[in-house]
Amino acid sequence: EESEEGASRQIKHLTHVEDRPLQGGEKGFTHAHDSLMAAADHIKKGKKTSELTTKYDGSPAIVYGYHPKNKKFFVASKSAFNKNPKINYTQQDIEANHGHSPGLVSKLKDALEHLPKVAPKQGVYQGDMLFSGNDKKRKGAGISFNPNPSGITYTAHGTEADRVKKAKVGVVTHLSYHGDEKNLNASHEVNHEKFAQHPDVWHQSAEHDTKHVHYDPMQQLEYKKHLDAAKKIHKENGPMMYAATSPHQGDANHLATYINQTVRTDDKPSVNGLMQHIYDKYAKASSSLKTPAAQSKKMSQGKEHVAYINTNNKHYENLLNMHNHLQQAKNVLVNVLNQHSGGLEHDIDGKKTDPEGFVVNHAGQPTKLVNRAEFSKANLLKVRK
């Protein structure tokens, strides 16, 4: 989902806004700060644009449209961006490329049959499938669908339920691609007016309409308090703090994995917690090694990390405090945005929930705004099962 430089620029992974400084230091903080400012401004102005979108818990991710080289309509999973891409122009292509995954085959076949009825006659798009085939169920007076068995169940009512009931497939499109087949560049801007209307396809825009939410003065003060506190730490400690903590910054490095652990356990991030997390990881890795010498070497590496962090304790403390303030500022905005559910009810296992989250598209990079205590925790625990 996140932008990645290379022969093509696709969206692979979305970063939590508060994690950006932990992954990218000073530049990460600047992007996080400016993304939150952009989201707050979007809310205040009551806008509905692709700059701020709703995250949908759809599956699978689907790439579709007219191939830039041969102009033929195709559908694909994210394997469209593999080194050897799997592009499907026919039902037979889908069987050949994905026959090992019957569920995916069924979804792609439905997409191939029905999406040409609404897709613009040129261009490549990416979205999430929300339903097809027999995925829909009657729920009271509404129609529900559950794209991920352990995720959100969406329920439509009224005229929207009538549309869902008639449709053969449902898809939310949130990206467009531009360029040739060897250099496709992702953009969050999707011109939904170019899409046709057809009863067989329930096609939803991901744009979040903020004219339906109320951002009251107390919420604005709370947001500003936390964003100002994060900015103060950045301004007063930035260069030394980012330099000192750089050994553990980056996607999938120790700071990132520790934050995910605290989401699972509901612990507040702390320097002592980070040191214990790293020590435990090296102890676990050491226990799997065969020789005492190898075990001792691995444990020494862990102890070196812990000693380094202890020496730079204040810098790590400042970084984690800044992370907390960014998260609190984000939570204010998420709570405001949750006032509008996009016309669908949400529940997980019968318990009413908010939308999965939101995405702010700033400076060409998407960043997610998610209630981590609710959705990120559930997803992380689901992965561990």
Image (cartoon, rainbow, N blue to C red):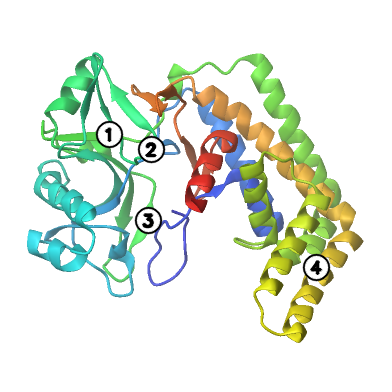
Q: Earlier in the sequence, mark 4 or mark 1?
A: 1
Q: Nearer the viewer, residue 275 or 366?
A: 275
- Disc 1 is placed on an element classified as strand
Marks 3 and 4 close (CB-CB < 8 Å):
no
Looking at the image, is mark 4 or mark 1 nearer the viewer?
A: 4
Looking at the image, is mark 3 or mark 2 nearer the viewer?
A: 2
Image point (76%, 47%), residue name:
320
- Disc 2 is placed on an element classified as loop
Q: CA distance from mark 3 to mark 1?
A: 19 Å
Q: Earlier in the sequence, mark 3 or mark 4?
A: 3
Residue at numbered disc 2: 56
The reply to whether residue 157 is visible in this rendering is yes
Q: CA distance from mark 1 to mark 2?
A: 10 Å
Q: Identity of the amino acid at label 2?
A: Tyr
Image point (37%, 56%), residue name:
186
Residue at numbered disc 3: 186
Q: Is residue 252 above or below residue 61?
A: below
Q: Earlier in the sequence, mark 3 or mark 1?
A: 3
- Disc 3 is placed on an element classified as strand
Q: Identity of the amino acid at label 4?
A: His
The reply to whether residue 30 is visible in this rendering is no
- Left or right for 373, reference 355: right
Marks 1 and 2 close (CB-CB < 8 Å):
yes
Q: Nearer the viewer, residue 123 or 160?
A: 160
Q: CA distance from mark 2 to mark 4?
A: 39 Å
User: Dot 2 surroundings within 10 Å: few (below 14), some, or many (20 or more)?
Assistant: many
Looking at the image, is mark 2 or mark 4 nearer the viewer?
A: 4
Q: Identity of the amino acid at label 3?
A: Ala
